[in-house]
Amino acid sequence: MLKNFLTYLHYMKYKIFSELTYEVIEPTTYIFNIQVAKTLNQIIVNESISISPDLKFEEFSLTNSENRFLKLQINYGTFTISYNAIVEVVEKPINQDLFEFDTSIIELDNDVLPFISSRRHCESDKLLHFAKKEFGQLPNVYSKVKAINDWVFNSIEYISDSTNSSTSACDTLISRFGVCKDFAHLCIAFCRALDIPARYFTGYAANLIPPDIHACFEAYICGQWIIFDPTKLTNTKNLVKIANGKDASEVAVASYHGNTICTKMIVQCEEIIV
């Protein structure tokens, strides 16, 4: 049934490729999050995972989640994991007529409630005063989120490889620099400080230079999850979703338990003209 909608809705097709190589120093368990999410507006035409040398792996998803993970273990040596996919993305309709209205917390769906709480990387509780002073006077949720997105773009300098996995929203606000992950975390923290649900987004981005897995954020506005890119490095219509989470720690491209080094990472996302 969803396939028939493509006749009437605008859609784009993408060719996805990612490849990661690791040197394993001691026994290590890995959890990868590189597969495209299966959602109502993303159709996976085909996909494949290959690992060299051949290793056993397990695919899994968490309860009530679209996120998809791969789990494997290796004792030593070097291995490469590769992911290929062809994906059709249907443009998600957004009802802008609702933007002038607000939704109270009591009216939120229960599955949205976890995205208004403070987190280690998005310390909204520490940013209440700042967020209310800068954005609290704006008339509705959409205007607040747009102002947050623009403020972070104008106030934070994008510097590649300038931060690490422990960098938080408060760190970024103080230092005034970061990468896409940090831009997203700061926007999420500001939104949650204003009781606006917000979640972390990772995806493959067409025309991103240099190619990489990109981080953005989504805000819940009048019953709709709306995506924003505070780095403004991409067109949000050219993103293929991998995962959502409360922050980056929930949807890391790769997390591991052991001792290992990533020696190579290749990411490609190309639009297929149809």
Image: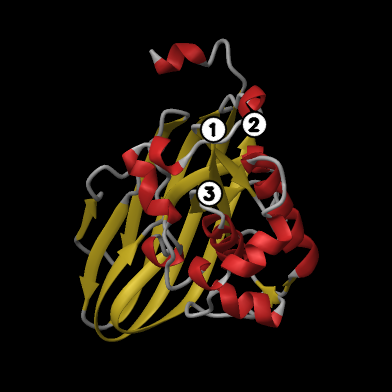
- Amino acid at circle 3: Ile
Say the numbered circle drawn on residue 96.
none
Which colour assignment does the render follow?
Answer: secondary structure
Residue drawn at the location 67% of the way across and 81% of the way down: 174
Q: Position of residue 124 (x, y in %)?
A: 51, 66
Q: Mark 2, residues whose alpha carbon is within 10 Å: few (<14), some, or many (≥20)?
A: some
Q: Mark 3, residues whose alpha carbon is within 10 Å: few (<14), some, or many (≥20)?
A: many
Q: Is residue 233 visible in the rendered structure shown here?
A: no
Residue 85: name its quadrant: top left
Q: Mark 1, residues whose alpha carbon is within 10 Å: few (<14), some, or many (≥20)?
A: many
Badge 1 or badge 2: first in the primary sequence: 2
Q: Position of residue 262 (x, y in %)?
A: 45, 78
- Secondary structure state at the residue bearing disc 2: loop
Badge 1 or badge 3: first in the primary sequence: 3
Whether tag 1 and tag 2 are in contact, CB under 8 A, the answer is yes
- Amino acid at circle 1: Cys
Question: Disc 1 and disc 2: Cα gap in Å?
Answer: 7 Å
Residue on which disc 2 sits = 99
- Secondary structure state at the residue bearing disc 1: loop
Residue on which disc 1 sits = 222
Residue drawn at the location 64% of the way across and 58% of the way down: 211
Q: Is residue 173 above or below residue 212?
A: below
Quarter of the figure with the N terminus: top left
Say the numbered circle drawn on residue 196.
3
Residue drawn at the location 54% of the way across and 47% of the way down: 218
